[in-house]
Amino acid sequence: MQFQETEYKLVEKILLGNGKFNKLQREFIELNETKTIVAGPGTGKTTALAAKIVLVLRHLNRIGSKDGLCIITHTNVAVNEINNALQQAGIGSIAHPHFIGTIHEFFNHFCVLPLYKYIFKINKLTFDVEHESDKEFYKAFLAQRYQWMNKPQYSNVKEWIANRIHDSKLVVNKETEGIEMVNSTSWEKFDNYSATMWQAKLSRKKQGFLTYDDTFLFSRFFLLDSRFKSMLQSRFKYVFLDEYQDTTPDGADLLEEIFGIENIIFQKIGDPYQTIVYGQPIPKIDEEQTFRLNLTNRFGVEIAEHLNIIMPQANVQTSSDKKSFTPIILLYENEQDIYTRYRTLIQEYELSHTSFKENTKEDKVLVWARHWASILKPGSVYKNKKPRKLESLNVLLKTLIVDFIAQKIVDNDGNISESKEWVTKHPKVNQLNKILLSILKSGINDEMKQALNDFVNELLEEKGLNRIDINNYLFSQLEDETQHTTFNLEESIGPVNDIFTIHSVKGETLRSVLVVDFIDKPLTNILLHKYGVNKEATYLYTDHNLLYVAMSRVTHLFVFAMHKRDWTTEVCNKLKNNWTVLEV
């Protein structure tokens, strides 16, 4: 699929300002066949994907096509970036027949919710890692089925079997077209109680209390009916799966089962070498079905040449105008001296290199394990620099507002599920996101209340409903919730709290990185193997990928701390010509 230069100029202005897409990015944007796109670090993958979606949608709108686009992302950050690009391009929000959202949102919307609505007659589902009341439900179920379990002397037996029910897995049997329970806990008496355990677990699930894994279980069950699969295949002509390496095997298999057919263009975009979830297999790469987006805009050849030693199959390429510093091996004797030396190194580079000083990206210390923070800085405790509580508060506030508006619509005339969907997909919802971000930073003051009041009233008026004012009980609820959780976003940033796990910075771009490696030194072992010191590769692929991720975050400077006793003559001979070697 080729696009006119005027179209390219439009999306380049929106997404790149004064920049231009490079040759590989344009090839990816115009790629119109089923492929796996292996996109390396800093290659502009998400931006190029956003451009591709804008251009394809404009093309479909221009020719009056009813073909649908399905965009499945790993996080809502990518959803927001794509939606913002669409808004600026004058397309508006993704609407029928198209879809954009996470993989769980996709399967819940098209499979799980319809299944529960039409089969189980339930409109509300509650998803969580697990539900606190599950085991109590199972105990009550067992007590009804087995009267002898109500006797005090058997209370432990009842609780023990309830735990077995909780831990046993449900699976779909394609041959019987039913849901079965498997003995995933290896219990020798499983057959004696399996029928009751199955009934108890399914009864609980039918109430709408689901885990995130249940999304794929019930979607697979729903799609046993080929009619539903055909409906999705007929609706979506183009399917884009972003960060495909992070997609769970169950989710990936289901998507392939639906969209891996000849008349659908199914493109999976991501970097398999950044698979860093322990136990998650690296996606297999079929080179004949692969397009490589491997020209990075993040760093220069000084970093790329080392990445290609650590991960040769990534074949990272650089442009000549990008310059970085030669990576540093920082030799130490005392772990507690490393951090201070790194901070002084940053100051030294700022004094001698203007481009480094003017770079606004962060400098971070990366650890393999959280408890290593206390080795580096005695007395310190690793803190999650992206607080889950903060994210939860954001979700809670948004839910209160969405539910309030949806209920007003329903009270007038409507369906609660449809009303919530209308609110969450409204073009002005980005306005709500900005207000909530301000509230998380500064609290809910009168200015924020008025901004929220205006937002709510705009949507109510659109539905012909009465306005509210800031004395409405909604604002009292919001105040109560924000008072219970106090956060200062600025406190989680900067040199005071700059120690992170490698896992936590995936997807980020940083000015510099210090990697420390203690205890069993898994990253040092990988480094020495890749440079030919250690002959055997006795390490996990996940740790190998972690080292690749850590080094590929930087624009300028990468520092690896190594103990002096590991810096043998052989190691020195192998690395001294490629690294700058400094002592603490």
Image (cartoon, rainbow, N blue to C red):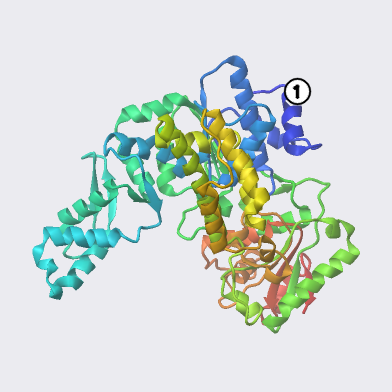
Residue hosting label 1:
6
**Is 353 or 395 nearer to us in this picture?**
395
**Is 487 or 138 nearer to us in this picture?**
487
Q: Quadrant of the N terminus?
A: top right
Residue, x 62% and y 29% (percent of image)?
Answer: 92
Left or right placement of residue 345 versus residue 446 in this view: right
Q: Is residue 554 above or below residue 459?
A: below
Instruction: Tell me residue 277's x, y (percent).
Output: 50, 58
Q: Is residue 347 above or below residue 170?
A: below
**Is 45 or 118 nearer to us in this picture?**
118
Q: Is residue 178 above or below residue 130?
A: above
* Secondary structure state at the residue bearing disc 1: helix
Residue, x 68% and y 49% (percent of image)?
Answer: 447
Left or right placement of residue 191 versus residue 235 in this view: left
Instruction: Tell me residue 482's x, y (percent).
Output: 56, 58
Circle 1 crowding by C-alpha within 10 Å: few under 14, some 14–19, many from 20: few
Q: Is residue 27 visible?
A: no
**Is 115 or 406 nearer to us in this picture?**
406
Residue, x 67% and y 44% (percent of image)?
Answer: 294
Left or right placement of residue 493 versus residue 218 in this view: right
- What's the residue type where badge 1 is placed? Thr
Q: Quadrant of residue 168?
A: bottom left
